[in-house]
Amino acid sequence: MVIPDALFHPKSLAVIGASRKPEKVGYGVFANLIHAGFPGDIYGVNPGGGEVLGRAVYSSIEEIPGAVELGVFVVPPAAILDGMPRLAEKGMRAAIVISAGFKETGGDGAGLERALCETARRVKVRVLGPNCLGLINTHARLNASFAAGTPPSGAISFFSQSGALCTAILDWAIGENVGFSKFISLGNKADISESDVMEYLSNDPETRVLLGYVESIDDGIRFLKVSREVTAKKPVILVKAGATAAGARAASSHTGSLAGSDRAYAAAFRQGGILRAETVEDLFDLALGFAMQPMPGGDRLLILTNAGGPGILAADTAERLGIPLAEVSQGLRARISGKVPPTASLGNPVDIIGDAQAGRYRDVLSVLRDDPAIDAVLVLLTPQAMTEPEGTARAVVQALSGSGKSAFASFLGEASVREARKVLSAGGIPSYPVPERAVRSLHAMLRYRRIRAVTPAESTDPAGIRKADARKAIDRALAAGKKNLGEEESRSVLEAYGFRFPRHALAQTSQEAVEAFTEMRRPVAMKIVSPDILHKTDVGGVRLNLSDPDSVAQAFVEITSAARRMVPSAWVAGVSVQEMVSGGRELILGMSRDPQFGPLLMFGLGGIYVEVLKDVSFRVAPVSRREAVEMIREIRAYPLLSSFRGSTPSDEGGIVDSLLRISRLSLDFPEIQELDLNPVMVMPKGRGVRAIDCRMTIAEAKR
């Protein structure tokens, strides 16, 4: 059920728990509604009756004389459960439950929250909260919260799982006179989630950019779907708390140990087109750029400054972020030179030197605004004896407003530029205390422009899959009570999904190992076979390039003896004798099932160094062919797979195909919890991929 308009644009509302005592939350909510100038009917309900701020308060819900579209509850949980059906009979279709005492208290509170959800579903009411700050819609003059004040109207909407962060951002917005459209405190998210809010705001004409603070996402699959739909229309910028918290479970694979919860969020944000802010400061900075300026038509930046140092800092930041500086053509130089002293620097940054007053800024900007080779302009000012900060700010606004270029400003300092910053903000030019923050905001806008330009990803199912064979192998292992599947058992599942392995044989004696070697007629590798041993090399469980019967027999004895000595509790099935595969590069491909987002795929260079270098990339399944290519090219070591110093490139198409097969396998079999193929040998272009070793963890799938 979608969020009804009654939540954001009610014609009438009731505050259940309105209070006459200023120190009570019920008073604060009622007062905010009145002071914000809400134009509809406001009804207060309190058993004591009377009036609050000159408005009548009714002693019961039944006494309310008119219809009610929105209910705001500031009473104990039991009273909410009792009052919600009664208010629904008066037409309520949305409710804001500010009261605490639900699942955040544990035990009985969790039961009360379940009862709240059941009641709301039964009477067809959508609920924001409980345990939340409330909601503000400046365009509807609705402040149904107990926050201290209402921000000016604007185009930014913000939702948050933290009420405290809501109040901090509100205070910042009011103090900086930054316009906001909506503030939504999600609280416990018993019913309305961040996905619901994003979906609603994507169609809200009063919202230009969405900001959010999230601590957890309950339905990751839906969140990813909604994100893709919303970011195709509007930018979404999120701060995710808990970025350094690793997964609590003990992972039994390389992928599981490297994944962690934040890897899944980062992958989902990227695939969903969401811009991630690392700090609340970044969130503010990016919001200003998106809300105030048009999207840049290209990525060429020109920096205009009255001092060399800040201009260099801005240029350095642009280069680090991959933003090209616009070329100052001879024609543009000629047009600028007549407006500046001979000592000015006409490169990029354009330095019009320290004695530049407002007129010089205005003259140069009037030339720059019409140059088609410039897509964005950053205006820097450092206060000096002859500087005119306010006049310069007005010149910037007059010259760049309506130019079609993305414009940013950084007037450095504090006391002498404070009023100038207000002029810039009022004129729609985002102003930043330091130039680096302005450049990072432009970079975010350029990233979003690229996101919008990408066509929607199409899923691709690889050919040659034998799902029934994989099902039999997994069911057989589950029936035997197995959780960790070693190479022998995992291989049958992966072969059914089109993975190619070298010729191999399981040897349980040294004689069987020699017979396998003789049949293969080529050098072999030998590996311990045990689901209880993850790192085979650590226990002396691997031998390579064995080329005669005696060395094969000796290796069998050494491998099995070392494994039993190093890991006496391990069950050893034998030794795998495999033909050697050479001429390729080692990779790792894997999957770990994330509790929120489902299958999380991993790619990187493989072998023994993967957990040391951690040069890996992640995506949430399903992945498209394009997303698989992005995974491959994202790692730092990608040049080693391409034509590095004239070497033959690796078969990138084969890697893409392998990632698509893992994606399909992970979606087809929710029983697979973790999967590693390490190493996988990618051969030169046109020769494909060979899986060398594998393992997986399985469990009964949750229905």
Image (cartoon, rainbow, N blue to C red):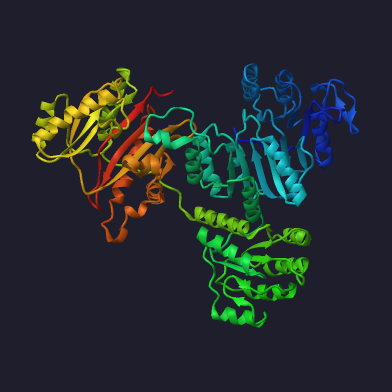
**Residue 297 or residue 353, whichever sits in front:** 353
Q: Is residue 346 left or right of residue 359?
A: left
Q: Is residue 404 visible?
A: no
Locate residue 593: give its quadrant.
Answer: top left
**Residue 609 or residue 394, whichever sits in front:** 609
Q: Residue at x 41, y 33 (%)?
A: 256
In the displayed structure, 486 sits above or below 443; it is above
Locate residue 607: give its quadrant.
Answer: top left
Q: Quadrant of the C terminus?
A: top left
Q: Indicate the position of residue 480 as horizontal and vertical percent values.
A: 29, 17
**Residue 241 or residue 701, whichever sits in front:** 241
Q: Is residue 103 left or right of residue 509?
A: right
In the displayed structure, 538 sits above or below 364; it is above
Locate residue 587: give its quadrant.
Answer: top left
Q: Residue at x 28, y 36 (%)?
A: 497
Q: Quadrant of the N terminus?
A: top right
Q: Indicate the position of residue 97 as horizontal and vertical percent values.
A: 71, 28
Q: Is residue 460 left or right of residue 167?
A: left
Q: Indicate the position of residue 440 as horizontal and vertical percent values.
A: 58, 56
Q: Residue at x 33, y 35 (%)?
A: 676
Callout count: 0
Q: Is residue 319 visible?
A: yes
